[in-house]
């Protein structure tokens, strides 16, 4: 009986993939296959799909409120990934529900570029902070932290030493996987400089070096190698990852952007398959100056949990490529972000316990650090690409009676919040400190960029709704949409407007 339900569920999924409906006369779905939960449902009956056949996400709990009197300082590593947002878009576009475990609010925020001030002088990073009303909790405030990486001109871009590591196993055999990946690699080729170098390694049941390190001026040779990519067989990813790193080391140049770019659905099932073992391997090469970029593809077999951890350990970023527009975003519009201008970037926020009674970091659950690690230059943290913006939000509760008392003297309590930031210009360099303070007498709700503030609040509200967060307060889709609409004045490539369309689903 169970096999029949499975067959019906998969048939429903096929109809949805073709843009067909599986509804009855009153518009209600009578059957669906939920790729997120690795489960199927027909006529109200459900069953679990085998674990290895579903997308894999690490579950986590939202950061709680913290009493400032107990812990006035909060520390976390930056997160420059955007995969979680693109995964959400893919599921909604294909009419599937979104797994709350797939929603990482920091990646929703950092998918977008914010209109923060650029660094000046010799700084590679600029930081900012402002406070306004929290839309979903009356009486609470929202602290927005903004970070902007230095932009690089075409002449300032370092030469690239890229190793493309391409999964050509059987699970990649579809247009939204190997087909889209081939288009992306070719498009990136058009953006590179003649002196940049590219290697191509493939893996399935065996590992092959399809292309030795080749200068981009030999573009026809590189495109010919890319055109040969076809998917078949099992997945010996661990062995291939080691070969890719060794290829990058063989052509290593300290003045280059030395990077492994891995395209996969994350289904490593031969050889080194343990995520912990892969992380250990990646960390060892990251210490030798090789960066990592993970590109995830497809549905139903996506190992999101593995790719996020591997990219974090490899001083890199993780993107999910769900369509050609996303391919253009990663490979063309934001290509400069492949170059890291700030390494081991960490944030530390100190709240005045007299003025702030509680606070909660929104997102960044797997990036929280010990306060003692903030000034430890040996402690690994996140990287920021050229021109990239990073956003973080805290929901804070003011000590209103104290703050609004008639005899309150701001000069006696000068700082409401202090935002400290550290980063390295090079992986082996010393960290550089930056600091911004919000004074206690600064009028609240006077934003430098109100459109950015409202947009960030709308994105966070939407993420909390999708996660069904216990901290979402009065947040609704309509509220999130109103906030996002207030943030559309800065939208270089239309990504913010696209979010409104997704919210309609």
Image (tube, rainbow, N blue to C red):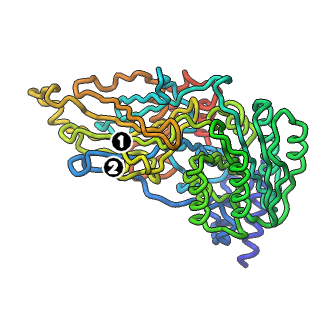
* On-image quarter of the N terminus: bottom right
Q: Where is residue 370 in the image (x, y as percent from the top left)?
A: 36, 53
Residue that mark 2 sits on = 371
Residue nearer the viewer, 273 or 198: 198
Mark 2 residue element: helix
434 relative to 20 in the view: left or right: left
Circle nearer the N terminus (1, 2) = 1
Asked if disc 1 and disc 2 are in contact, CB closer than 8 Å, the reply is yes
Residue nearer the viewer, 79 or 160: 160
Query: Is any part of residue 307 visible from this angle?
Result: yes
Mark 1 residue element: strand
Please name the residue shown 36% across and 45% down the image.
375
Please name the residue shown 77% across and 39% down the image.
197
Residue nearer the viewer, 443 or 268: 268
Q: Measure how far apart labels 1 and 2 are at the Cα level.
A: 8 Å
The disc at residue 348 is 1
Q: Position of residue 102 (x, y in %)?
A: 56, 54
291 relative to 5 in the view: left or right: left
């Amino acid at each position: 009986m169970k096999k029949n339900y499975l067959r019906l569920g998969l048939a429903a999924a096929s109809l949805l993939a073709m843009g067909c409906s599986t509804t009855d006369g009153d518009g209600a779905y009578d059957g669906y296959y939920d790729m997120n939960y690795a489960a199927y449902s027909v006529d109200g009956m459900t069953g679990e799909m085998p674990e290895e056949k579903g997308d894999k996400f690490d579950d986590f709990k939202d950061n709680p409120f913290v009493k400032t009197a107990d812990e006035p300082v909060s520390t976390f590593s930056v997160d420059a990934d955007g995969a979680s947002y693109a995964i959400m878009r893919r599921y909604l576009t294909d009419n599937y529900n979104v797994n709350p475990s797939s929603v990482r609010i920091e990646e929703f925020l950092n998918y977008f570029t914010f209109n923060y001030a650029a660094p000046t002088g010799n700084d590679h990073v600029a930081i900012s902070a402002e406070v306004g009303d929290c839309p979903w909790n009356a009486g609470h405030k929202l602290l927005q932290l903004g970070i902007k990486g230095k932009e690089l001109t075409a002449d300032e871009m370092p030469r690239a030493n890229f190793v493309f590591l391409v999964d050509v196993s059987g699970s990649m055999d579809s247009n939204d996987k190997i087909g889209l990946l081939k288009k992306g690699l070719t498009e990136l080729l058009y953006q590179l400089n003649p002196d940049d170098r590219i290697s191509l390694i493939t893996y399935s049941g065996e590992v092959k070096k399809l292309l030795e390190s080749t200068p981009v001026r030999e573009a026809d040779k590189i495109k010919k190698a890319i055109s040969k990519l076809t998917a078949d067989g099992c997945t010996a990813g661990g062995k291939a990852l080691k070969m890719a790193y060794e290829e990058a080391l063989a052509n290593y140049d300290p003045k280059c952007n030395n990077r492994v770019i891995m395209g996969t659905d994350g289904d490593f099932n031969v050889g080194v398959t343990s995520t912990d073992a892969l992380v250990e391997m990646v960390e060892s090469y990251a210490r030798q100056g090789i960066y990592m970029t993970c590109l995830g593809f497809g549905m139903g077999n996506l190992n999101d949990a593995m790719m996020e951890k591997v990219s974090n350990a490899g001083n890199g970023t993780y993107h999910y490529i769900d369509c050609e527009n996303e391919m253009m975003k990663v490979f063309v519009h934001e290509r400069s972000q492949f170059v890291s201008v700030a390494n081991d970037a960490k944030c530390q926020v100190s709240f005045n316990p007299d003025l702030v009674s509680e606070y909660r970091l929104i997102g960044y659950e797997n990036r929280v650090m010990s306060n003692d690690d903030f000034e430890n230059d040996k402690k690994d943290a996140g990287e920021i690409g050229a021109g990239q913006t990073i956003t973080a939000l805290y929901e804070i509760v003011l000590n209103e009676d104290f703050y609004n008392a008639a005899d309150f003297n701001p000069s006696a309590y000068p700082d409401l919040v202090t935002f400290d930031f550290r980063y390295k210009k090079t992986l082996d360099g010393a960290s550089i400190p930056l600091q911004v303070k919000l004074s206690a007498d600064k009028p609240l709700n006077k934003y430098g960029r109100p459109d950015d503030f409202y947009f960030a609040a709308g994105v966070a509200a939407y993420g909390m709704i999708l996660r069904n967060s216990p901290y979402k307060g009065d947040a609704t889709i309509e509220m999130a949409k109103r906030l996002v609409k207030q943030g559309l004045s800065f939208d270089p490539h239309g990504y913010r407007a696209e979010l409104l369309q997704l919210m309609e689903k």
